[in-house]
Image (tube, grey):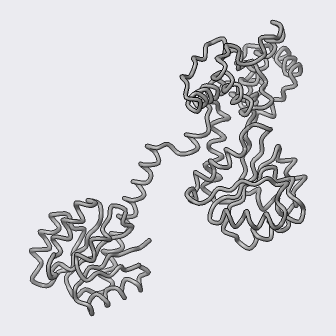
Amino acid sequence: MRRVLLVEDDAPVREALAQSLMLAECDPVPAASFVVAKDHITRGFEGVIVSDMRMPGRDGFHLLNYAQDVDVDLPVILLTGEGDIPMAVRAMGEGAFGFLEKPCAPSDLMVVVERALKTRALVLENRALKIQLEAGDPAARLIFGVSDKAEALREQVRAVARTGSDALLSGAPGTGIYKVAEVIHLCSKSACAPFVKRSGAGLDPVALDAALDDAKGGTLFIDEISATPAQSQFQLLDRLEQAVNVRVIGGGATRDTLQTALNPDLFYRLDVGRAHIPTLAERPEDIPVLFAQYVAQAAEQSGTIAPEVGSDQIADLIAQDWPGNARSLMSAATRFVLGGDTQVHASLQLGLSEQLAQVERALLVSALGQHKGQASATAKALKLPRKTFYDKLARYDLKPENYRT
């Protein structure tokens, strides 16, 4: 926003300066005195100050000092009469951004104002970036994992959020599609606007309009969007074509399922942004990280001290397939906290050969993920002969192409 706080006690001069600023597509905020102007001088003021040097009561020096105390990086441009040049030079030494001699041509005024506005915008942008880096962006704070696939998911989320486009998310049951959709919303410019979740099966035309209205300015997440009635799909496409002020994110098991079940025009309209949430079986190295996080959350919610997760529990966790993905891992963590179980899963009831097979499969999956599905590199890393490696892939029904990014 190109705002200029214009402080000038002479009404005709103030009006002429305000007109020059408006013609240059600025937003002048007129003030006849320091008393009127000071309420606009804040650390978050998204603009600059242009002030007369000589005014009744508090003069330009007082305004400059006040602005410096509030925000040393807030540009103040002073307007001086012919005899005020030494005073203006002194003001520059005390932090004024610039000074102009009255009367000044609009072109001369705007050269200094434009420079000040650019400087202010850069300061505010750097401050916002610093705050974001210190706090950690939502993708880093809310999507857990140390694997390449976890980092790739975080990058996908950030990319989709930056575009502001509609999106389709895919992932097996329990992978947390709803959570990823919310993180996209929190990473976007509309993070403070509503985030609304609805089930596709329950979205008749009336419910769809109500949901879009509730999410105005923000994000509407439609879970299992492929179950949305055909009439509502047509209506949603129509609303999107009308540029409704809502980002729509749809979720489903696989992209192929979404493409088959959705109206083709709607599918391609939403498929601008996309992200796939990997299963736990595809990233077993993330399981201990996720489990520790869920244990901490469960302990906090129950008001208890989180029990220590030992090496035996970690080995047991990694050995599992976790068909319920993050949802089932979260349930296991809650049981572990509430019951103090040393057995976080029923796997230890299996025989030794079954347990070893699960561990072997987990290691193969992890290696395939680390080497992005490159079979030769994976076999070399595992120090397995090529034929043995492919025999093990066939045994566990693992396909290298599923791990390529």
From the viewer's side, name the closer residue of 201 and 367: 201
Residue 304: which quarter of the image? top right
Q: How many marks?
A: 0
Farthest front residue in view:
303
- Residue 315 figure quarter: top right
- Left or right of 291, for residue 78: left
Task: Tell which residue pokes out farthest to the bottom in this image.
Answer: 12
Residue at the location (55% across, 31% down)?
A: 300
From the viewer's perspective, tell me whether residue 177 is left or right of residue 257.
left
Q: Is residue 30 above or below residue 235?
A: below
Q: Is residue 113 at least partly visible in the picture?
A: yes
Identify whether 342 is placed above or below 16. above
The percent coordinates of residue 8 (x first, y second) are 24, 83
Q: Position of residue 124 (x, y in %)?
A: 39, 59
Q: Position of residue 78 (x, y in %)?
A: 22, 75
Which residue ends up furthest to the top in the rendered image? Answer: 352
Where's residue 201, x and y in %? 85, 54
Q: Residue at x 85, y 53 (%)?
A: 226
Question: Nearest the camera: 104 or 1?
Answer: 1
Which one is in front, 58 or 241?
58
Position of the N terminus, as image quadrant, is: bottom left
Residue 267 location, quadrant: bottom right
Q: Residue at x 62, y 65 (%)?
A: 217
Q: Compared with residue 396, is residue 325 higher up or lower down, i.e. above or below?
A: below
Q: In the image, 399: left or right of 215?
A: right
Q: Quadrant of the C terminus?
A: top right
* Residue appearing at x 70%, y 20% in the figure: 317
Res 405 visible: no
